[in-house]
Image (cartoon, grey):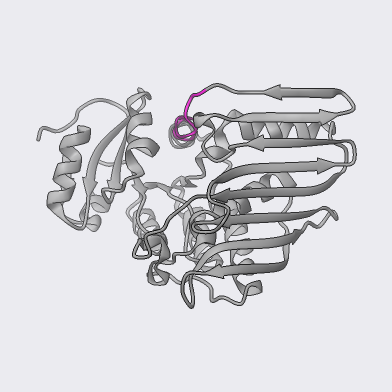
Amino acid sequence: MTEDTRPGLRIGILGAAAIAPAALIAPAGRNPEVVVSAIAARDRSRAEEFARKHGIAQVYDSYQALVDAPDLDAIYIPLPNGLHGRWTRAAIAAGKHVLCEKPFTANAAEAREIETLASDSGVVVMEAFHNRYHPLITGAEKIIASGELGKLVRVEAAFSFPLSKSSDIRYDYRLAGGALMDAGCYPVHLARVLGGENPEVVAAQAKLRGPQIDRAMTAELRFPSGHTGRIRCSMWSADVLSASATVVGEQGRMRLLNPILPQLGHVLSVRSVDGRRLRRFGRRPSYDYQLDAFVAAVLRGEPIATGPGDAVATMTVIDAIYQAAGLPLRQPS
């Protein structure tokens, strides 16, 4: 393979993950400031096949070799949950910017450690909550901030999808798996964003796939200002497929249909004293908005909404839900 000499932010991928083409490679092809330059995988032949398929110039023999590569500016980490923290730390130590898939770490203690490392390093470290950067979510925030809904009363968020294969790594406790980690991190984050505060967990109930692994989770929340909330998530339950969020205020109600992958179709509906209306924000992928934000932060110092501090807050709620449900916290692999 020949070296890619196009200008831009040079990103390397750790792992030939199924999410990488949609989450990074395709958006990078639409962003003139980015080039995906390299990949490493546990199996070099798999990395080579991935590189050929997606036009990636360089294949490294190991994750560490890619992290240490002098011709890369940033690392994208789509590895299993339990490995996120280890390789984010390695990337920071190598002076690389980081875009890490959610959930950011195995637990809140690990997230706090990385928050400190990132603060001291000067590199950009961003959790890949791509939907946070989509106009559906930022538009909903503006409606809440405008006061149209009145004082908040209740915030609910849900995300469920079917994952029947019991051997899938997302059901592996050793890799920090579980429905709350892989599906539930989205509604937890949405509840925090739309609720405007970091909630405490009042109660939680899990449905189990194994002694330590949740296949579904429900949790009741209470926010400091008095409004309440609920998150629901599942990778295997009667709630086969759902993605929604609802915000109820004293003067109105707002509902978001598909706030997880809005490019697949979404609706924002509002009913208040101002009347009823529906809004849609186009089909541009949420991953494109996310990459725009990452590039702007790295190249121009612009702020990001999903930095390590935000990740600490999300992981703190996730830890509290596991504790309330009587399950152990996830641990780094």
Residue drawn at x 63%, y 67% as measured from the top left: 321
Return the x and y of residue 149 as percentages of the image width and height: 84, 35
Q: Is residue 288 magenta?
A: yes
Magenta span main SS:
helix
Q: Quadrant of the N terminus?
A: top left
Return the x and y of residue 307 as percentages of the image width and height: 54, 48
Return the x and y of residue 113 as percentages of the image width and height: 50, 65
Residue drawn at x 28%, y 43% as measured from the top left: 12
Using residue 287 as the reference point, say whether residue 108 is left or right of it: right
Quadrant position of residue 309: bottom right
The answer to whether one can see residue 83 in this image is: no
The answer to whether one can see residue 76 in this image is: yes
The residue most toward the left is 1
Quadrant position of residue 216: bottom right
Vertical arrangement, residue 102 with respect to residue 72, above or below: below
Question: Closest to the observer: 20 or 234?
Answer: 234
Vertical arrangement, residue 162 with respect to residue 317, above or below: above
Question: Closest to the observer: 50 or 168?
Answer: 168
The magenta span reads 283-292
Using residue 24 as the reference point, say whether residue 212 is left or right of it: right
Using residue 287 as the reference point, say whether residue 314 is left or right of it: right
Q: Is residue 153 magenta?
A: no
